Image (cartoon, helix red, strand yellow):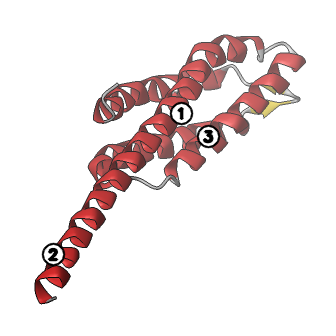
């Protein structure tokens, strides 16, 4: 009877350990998918925002659209920072948090640069927002490699 209990206990430990491994793998895949979605958002922003910012200097509708785009990017960055991160991606996630911090700060600067509904053209000469957003893609490429994509 004791041997049976020992065998059953050993089997349970193996099963529980296997479940933990499967949960870790699933958490990593989920995180990679969320990082990939965030990369798509950041890439769209980096592609479309510069031209829209140029238009926002003289076009009220473009200025409103840019403000909306800036707010959405800020919300995406802040939401990404709050994700549950698998241990394997913790260092990369921290790098993105640091980049996102710069992005949020730059977005706030942009949001404060609207005068009479239009974007102040000086902001375009003194910002690194679009480059910072593009820099995230290299980090997320590394995260995608964690998921085997």
Q: Nearer the viewer, mark 2 or mark 1?
A: 2
Instruction: Please state if 73 lies on the left or on the right of 132 as rendered.
Output: right
Sequence order check: which comes first, mark 2 or mark 3? Answer: 2
Residue lying furthest front: 1
Q: Which mark is residue 58?
A: none
Looking at this view, is 131 or 127 the one in front? 131
Residue bearing the label numbered 2: 7
Residue bearing the label numbered 3: 76
Q: Tell me if residue 145 comes above or below residue 18 in the rendering.
A: above
Q: Are marks 2 and 3 in contact (CB under 8 Å)?
A: no
C-alpha gap between disc 2 and disc 1: 46 Å
C-alpha gap between disc 1 and disc 3: 7 Å
Instruction: Please state if 55 lies on the left or on the right of 141 as rendered.
Output: right
Q: Are marks 1 and 3 in contact (CB under 8 Å)?
A: yes
Q: How many marks?
A: 3
Residue bearing the label numbered 1: 38
Label 3, secondary structure: give it.
helix
Label 2, secondary structure: give it.
helix
């Amino acid at each position: 009877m004791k041997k049976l209990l020992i065998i059953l206990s050993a089997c349970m430990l193996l099963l529980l350990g296997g479940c933990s491994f499967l949960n870790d793998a699933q958490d990593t895949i989920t995180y990679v998918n969320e990082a990939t979605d965030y990369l798509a958002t950041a890439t769209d922003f980096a592609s479309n925002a510069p031209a829209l910012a140029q238009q926002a200097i003289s076009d009220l509708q473009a200025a409103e659209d840019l403000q909306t785009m800036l707010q959405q990017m800020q919300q995406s960055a802040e939401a990404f920072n709050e994700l549950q991160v698998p241990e394997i991606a913790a260092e990369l996630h921290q790098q993105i948090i640091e980049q996102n911090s710069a992005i949020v700060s730059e977005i706030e600067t942009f949001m404060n640069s609207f005068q009479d509904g239009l974007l102040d053209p000086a902001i375009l000469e003194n910002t690194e927002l679009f480059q910072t957003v593009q820099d995230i893609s290299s980090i997320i490429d590394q995260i995608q490699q964690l998921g085997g994509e």
